Image (cartoon, helix red, strand yellow):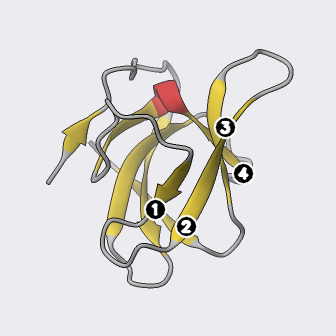
Amino acid sequence: MKFKNPNARKIKGSHLLLISCAYCKEPTLKYQKVGNSGLIKMYNDRILEGNIDFSKYHGVLLCPNCGEQVAIRYITKNDRKEAYRLHHSTFNKKKIRD
């Protein structure tokens, strides 16, 4: 089941990434990435849609299929925005067109 993120907004100059669980290979969410650097954190307002209900509070992001923890929620120091810090080697990313 796909859920739209109510906080999402279009980011100019971004490309779409399909984030999936590294354990079960289940696609989890679509994210707008800016730049070519590595994916360390995901801002909440750049997540477009996913298999997670974004209207509820999430302290962690869990894979909806296998239940493994993919990321943990935190507030960034510099700009005080809500983001998810991804755990190393628990996710796969794939650049998509959409």
Which is closer to the viewer, label 3 or label 2?
Answer: 2
In space, the residues marked 1 and 3 are separated at their CA atoms by 26 Å
Q: From mark 1 to mark 4, how far is it between C-alphas?
A: 16 Å
Percent x, y of residue 22? 50, 79
- Residue drawn at (85%, 24%) of the image: 77
Q: Which residue is mark 4?
A: 40
> Which of disc 4 and disc 3 is earlier in sequence?
3
Left or right of residue 77: residue 3: left
Residue 50: image location, x then y, percent: 30, 48
Give the SS element for disc 2: strand
Q: Which label belongs to residue 75?
A: none
Q: Marks 3 and 2, Cα distance to the nearest angstrom?
A: 26 Å
Identity, as a three-letter code, of the amino acid under mark 2? Gln
- Residue at left 47%, top 84%? 23
Residue in the image at 77% along x and 28% along y: 76
Q: How many marks?
A: 4
Task: Give me the C-alpha separation between circle 3 and circle 4.
Answer: 12 Å
Residue type at tag 3: Gly
Mark 3 highlights which residue?
35
Judged left or right of residue 31, residue 55 is left
- The residue that label 1 is drawn on is 62
Q: Which residue is mark 2?
A: 69
Residue 24 position, x and y percent, is 39, 84
Q: Nearer the viewer, residue 25 or 17?
A: 25
Give the quarter of the figure containing the N terminus. Answer: bottom left
What amino acid is found at the position of numbered circle 1 in the picture?
A: Leu
Residue 79 point in image, percent of width and height:
77, 15
For marks 1 and 4 on the same chain, the one whose residue lies earlier in the sequence: 4
Q: Nearer the viewer, mark 2 or mark 4?
A: 2
Tell which circle, 2 or 1, labels the residue nearer the N-terminal end: 1
